Image (spheres, rainbow, N blue to C red):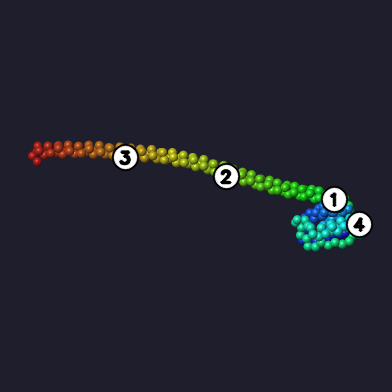
């Protein structure tokens, strides 16, 4: 049995599924021990198995990376310490991932609560705006009612003016008729007086 420590460095080697990627490979190559952990800017793996299987695994790790990983260096060295069994690591890894998922879920719920709070605030502001709009519409309705009343009064005034103008026209017509009658009467009187004067003149020989 041989034990190896593999250190993988790069600008993107964490949070890209590296541990699960090599855990699956370790199972495929029949390794008995496997451990993995994130350390600062690199990922560290401990493996245990027979010489051939470990060598094949190391060669695989040097040439194959997760899809979104950015690897700069893969180093291997002998290791003398204890290495966790694959089954035990898988159990611990599963628990860690579940805890991570739960924490992410809690974080998402917290963000959702924050978003809901902001939405409630926006809805409250919208309600206030709608209340102000309703108030403005109420005032506009009142103004329109007053305008209608003013227009109604204007119509009444115009109607009265029309009636007054009609009466003025009738009065003017009556005055003109009276003037014509008076003129005719005066002309008749003047003619009668002239005839009487002419008769008197004739009688006195003028």
Q: What is the spatial separation of the Cα atoms under label 1 and label 4, in whole angstroms? A: 21 Å
Callout 4: few (<14), some (14-19), or many (20+) C-alpha neighbours within 10 Å? few
What residue sits right under mark 3 in the picture?
172
Closer to the chain start, of discs 2 and 4, is 4
Which label sits on residue 1?
4
Q: Residues within 10 Å of mark 3 (few under 14, many from 20)?
A: few
Q: Residue at x 91, y 59 (%)?
A: 80
Q: Position of residue 144 (x, y in %)?
A: 52, 42
Calculate the distance from the C-alpha at mark 2 to the C-alpha at mark 4: 86 Å
Disc 2 target residue: 136
When the figure is inspected, residue 54 is found, relative to residue 133, above or below; the finding is below
Label 2 CA crowd tier, 10 Å (few <14, some 14–19, many 20+): few
Query: Element at badge 2?
Result: helix
How far apart marks 3 and 4 lie (CA) works out to 136 Å
The C terminus lies in which quarter of the figure?
Answer: top left
Measuring from the top left, give residue 5's x and y in whole percent. Answer: 86, 59
Estimate the x, y position of residue 133 in percent, counting from the top left. Answer: 59, 45
Query: Could you say which quadrant of the image residue 137 lies in?
Result: top right
Q: Residue at x 57, y 42 (%)?
A: 138
Specify whether residue 38 is in view.
yes
| Nearest the eye: 118 or 178 | 118
- Give the spatial CA distance, label 2 vs label 3: 52 Å
Q: Which of marks 3 and 4 is nearer the N terminus?
A: 4
């Amino acid at each position: 049995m041989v034990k190896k420590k593999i250190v993988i460095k790069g600008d993107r080697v964490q949070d890209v599924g590296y541990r699960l990627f090599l855990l699956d490979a370790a199972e495929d190559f029949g390794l008995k021990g496997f451990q993995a952990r994130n350390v600062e800017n690199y990922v560290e793996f401990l493996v245990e198995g027979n010489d051939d299987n470990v060598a094949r695994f190391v060669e695989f790790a040097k040439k194959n990376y997760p899809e979104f990983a950015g690897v700069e260096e893969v180093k291997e060295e002998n290791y003398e310490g204890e290495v966790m069994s694959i089954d035990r690591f898988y159990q611990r890894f599963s628990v860690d991932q579940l805890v991570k998922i739960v924490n992410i879920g809690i974080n998402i719920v917290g963000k959702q609560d924050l978003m809901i709070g902001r939405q409630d605030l926006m809805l409250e502001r919208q309600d206030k705006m709608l209340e102000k709009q309703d108030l403005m519409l109420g005032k506009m309705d009142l103004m329109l009612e007053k305008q209608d009343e003013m227009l109604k009064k204007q119509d009444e005034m115009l109607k009265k003016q029309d009636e007054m103008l009609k009466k003025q026209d009738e009065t003017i017509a009556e005055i003109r008729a009276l003037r014509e009658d008076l003129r005719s009467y005066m002309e008749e009187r003047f003619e009668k007086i002239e005839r009487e004067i002419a008769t008197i003149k004739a009688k006195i020989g003028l």
